[in-house]
Structures are given as structure tokens and as C-alpha cells.
Image: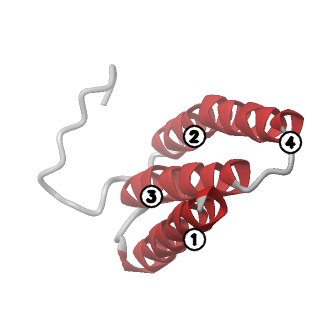
């Protein structure tokens, strides 16, 4: 009975992760500029990764494997925001304006 519940939970998490990854992929094509794409590349893609790794941890054969999956998740949660920040910063420094003309630039010198 517990195995069935684990399978259902893992399956639900995998489907949720796949849907979030699909949303992120579609959003990358639909967003008008780099600034909006950063949001799409980080938020749903990160949640997709969380759901997928959680599903793998639920079905992991041992606690050690689950711990490694949690470690991989923590490292991703640490590096994804830093990478998106650096992409935004590099885009801002290159002088690329936002697609929306009413966007407010609150950065110094902007």
C-alpha cells in the first residue's frame, strides 16, 4: 500500500515538473525581452527542478541517494538566482533597454 502511495506521489510530482518545464519553455519564446525571459527561465524552471528531484527522492532506493538529490537541489537553489542576477546585470550594463517603454529603471545611473 505504501509503495502505491509513493508511486502516485512521484508520478504526480513528475507530471507537475514536466508541466512547469513546458511553461518555462513556452515562456522563453513568448517574452519580449531578456529581462522578462530571466523571470521565465528561473521561476518555473526552478519549481520544475524541485518537483522532479522531489519525485526522484521519493522513489530513491536509499536514504543516501535521497540525500544526494537534496544536496543537488540545494546547490541549484543557490546557483540559479546568482546566475539570473548576473545575466540581468550584464544585460543592463550592455545598455539593452526593456521592451516596455513604461518600465522603471531604479538602478544608479539609469
Read off the residue under disc 3: 44
Q: Quadrant of the N terminus?
A: bottom right
Say which label, 3 or 1, has the lower sequence index.
1
Mark 3 or 2: in front is 3
In the picture as drawn, the residue positioned furthest to the front comes out as 1
Say which label, 1 or 2, has the lower sequence index.
1
Q: How many marks?
A: 4
Taking the spot 46% from the left edge, 41% from the top edge, the residue there is 92
Tell me if mark 1 has few (under 14), some (14-19) or many (20+) residues whose alpha carbon lies within 10 angstroms of its own: some
Q: CA distance from mark 4 to mark 2?
A: 42 Å
Q: Quadrant of the C terminus?
A: top left
Read off the residue under disc 2: 90
x and y, in percent, of residue 14 in the image: 58, 68
Read off the residue under disc 1: 11
Tell me the SS state at disc 2.
helix
Q: Are marks 3 and 2 in contact (CB under 8 Å)?
A: no
Mark 4 or 2: in front is 4
Tell me the SS state at disc 1.
helix
Taking the spot 77% from the left edge, 41% from the top edge, the residue there is 69
Q: CA distance from mark 4 to mark 1?
A: 18 Å
Q: CA distance from mark 1 to mark 2?
A: 39 Å
Judge by depth and name the residue closer to the eye, 96 or 33: 33
Amino acid at each position: 500500500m505504501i509503495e502505491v502511495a509513493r508511486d502516485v506521489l512521484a508520478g504526480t510530482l513528475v507530471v507537475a515538473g514536466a508541466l512547469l518545464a513546458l511553461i518555462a519553455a513556452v515562456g522563453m519564446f513568448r517574452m519580449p525581452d531578456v529581462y522578462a525571459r530571466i523571470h521565465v527561465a528561473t521561476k518555473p524552471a526552478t519549481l520544475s527542478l524541485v518537483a522532479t528531484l522531489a519525485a526522484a527522492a521519493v522513489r530513491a532506493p536509499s536514504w543516501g541517494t535521497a540525500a544526494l538529490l537534496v544536496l543537488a537541489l540545494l546547490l541549484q537553489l543557490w546557483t540559479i538566482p546568482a546566475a539570473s542576477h548576473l545575466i540581468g546585470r550584464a544585460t543592463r550594463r550592455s545598455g539593452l533597454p526593456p521592451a516596455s517603454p513604461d518600465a522603471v529603471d531604479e538602478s544608479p545611473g539609469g
